């Protein structure tokens, strides 16, 4: 997937990794980091920086704050999702509310999408 990397976004992605939202930190430290497949945080893919990316599963996970539910955010997310789908990736979107109120359900949904990929 490196052929889609945009070096101009690398610095921004590094800053986002250092300053994750509390929901991103929760999902990363309490679930994704411990899975038997590798996830990258704030991964540059073309003109996008995605919250979490698993190359092995061809999976992108996006956590959406309130701005994603305003008209401009909905349009931008649709364009991003179309681009990512064009790369052959599946995009899972969860709201910050989902992370805060239904963390177990979010984790179960992610596991469904990566089942069978375990390195064991």
Image: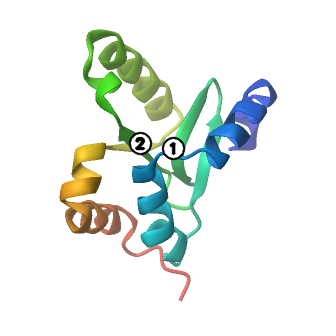
Query: Can you say which quadrant of the picture contains the N terminus?
Result: top right
Q: Is residue 107 above or below residue 2?
A: below
Badge 2 element: strand
Give the label on residue 62, or none: 2
How far across and down, in percent of the image, does residue 51 sit? 51, 44
Q: Secondary structure at mark 1?
A: strand
Q: Residue at x 29, y 54 (%)?
A: 99
* Left or right of 63 on screen, residue 54: right
Q: Is residue 37 above or below residue 2?
A: below
Q: Quadrant of residue 2?
A: top right
State the residue at coordinates (62%, 40%).
Answer: 16
| Measured Cα–Cα span from mark 1 to mark 2 | 5 Å
54 horizontally vs 7: left or right:
left
The furthest residue to the bottom: 120
| Residue 39 visible to an observer of this rendering | yes
Marks 1 & 2, CB-CB < 8 Å contact:
yes
- Ranked by sequence position, the earlier of labels 1 and 2 is 1
x%, y% of residue 12?
70, 31
The colour mode here is: rainbow
């Amino acid at each position: 997937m490196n052929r889609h990397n945009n070096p101009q976004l690398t610095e921004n992605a590094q800053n986002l990794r250092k300053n994750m939202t509390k929901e991103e930190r929760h999902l990363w430290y309490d679930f994704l980091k411990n899975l038997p497949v590798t996830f990258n945080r704030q991964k540059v893919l073309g003109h996008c920086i995605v919250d979490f990316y698993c190359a092995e599963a061809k999976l992108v996970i996006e956590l959406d704050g309130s701005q994603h539910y305003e008209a401009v955010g909905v349009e931008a997310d649709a364009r991003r999702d179309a681009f990512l789908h064009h790369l052959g990736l599946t995009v899972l979107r969860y709201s910050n509310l989902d992370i805060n109120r239904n963390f177990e359900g979010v984790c179960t949904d992610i596991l469904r999408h990566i089942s069978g990929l375990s390195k064991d």
